[in-house]
Amino acid sequence: MNPAKKQMKIKESLAHYYDRRGILNEIEDGPAAFSLADDLREQILSGKRSRRLKNISIKLEPAQIQALQKIAVQKAIPYQTLIRSFLAEAIKKELHI
C-alpha cells in the first residue's frame, strides 16, 4: 500500500475511534509529571515574563481537540497552551533553530 494512503487510513481510523469512544474512558487518575525549563520557571516566579498574544481562529477536527485535551490533562496544562507549545516546537524544527 502507498505510504501516503496508509497514513491517511491510520488518521481516519483514529478519528473514527475517538468519535465512537471519546477519551473520558482513557483518562487516568493520578499524579502527572510536569516540569518547566529553569529559565521559564525563573521568569514566571520573578514576574518578569511578559508577552503579547494575538487571537486567531483555527478549525480542528473534534477528534484532534479531544486528543489535545487528553494530552493537556496528562501534562496538567491548558490545551491552548499545549497547542502553542506544539506550534513553537514545529516552528523551531522547520527553521532549524
Image: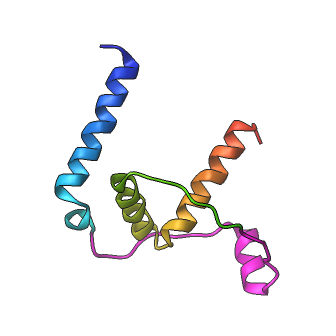
Please report the residue visible at 60 percent of the width from the left and 58 percent of the height from the top. 85
The residue stretch that appears in magenta: 28-53
Q: Is residue 20 magenta?
A: no
Where, by quadrant of the figure, is residue 91 drawn?
top right
Please report the residue visible at 38 percent of the width from the left and 51 percent of the height from the top. 61
Residue in the foreground of this view, choosing between 74 and 14: 14
Please report the residue visible at 27 percent of the width from the left and 69 percent of the height from the top. 28
Q: In the figure, is residue 51 to the left or right of 20?
A: right
Residue in the foreground of this view, choosing between 28 and 87: 87
Where, by quadrant of the figure, is residue 67 drawn?
bottom left
Q: How many marks?
A: 0
Residue 9 point in image, percent of width and height: 29, 30
Residue 64 point in image, percent of width and height: 39, 53
**10 to 87, vertically: above or below:** above
Residue in the foreground of this view, choosing between 6 and 59: 59
Residue 86 point in image, percent of width and height: 57, 53
Tell me the quarter of the image containing the C terminus. top right
Residue 55 point in image, percent of width and height: 65, 67
Question: Which colour style is shown?
Answer: rainbow
**82 to 43, vertically: above or below:** above
Please report the residue visible at 78 percent of the width from the left and 86 percent of the height from the top. 47
Q: In the figure, is residue 35 to the left or right of 15?
A: right
Q: Is residue 33 magenta?
A: yes
Where, by quadrant of the figure, is residue 42 drawn?
bottom right
Tell me the quarter of the image containing the N terminus. top left
- Mostly what secondary structure, the magenta segment? loop
Residue in the foreground of this view, choosing between 57 and 24: 57
**55 to 7, vertically: above or below:** below
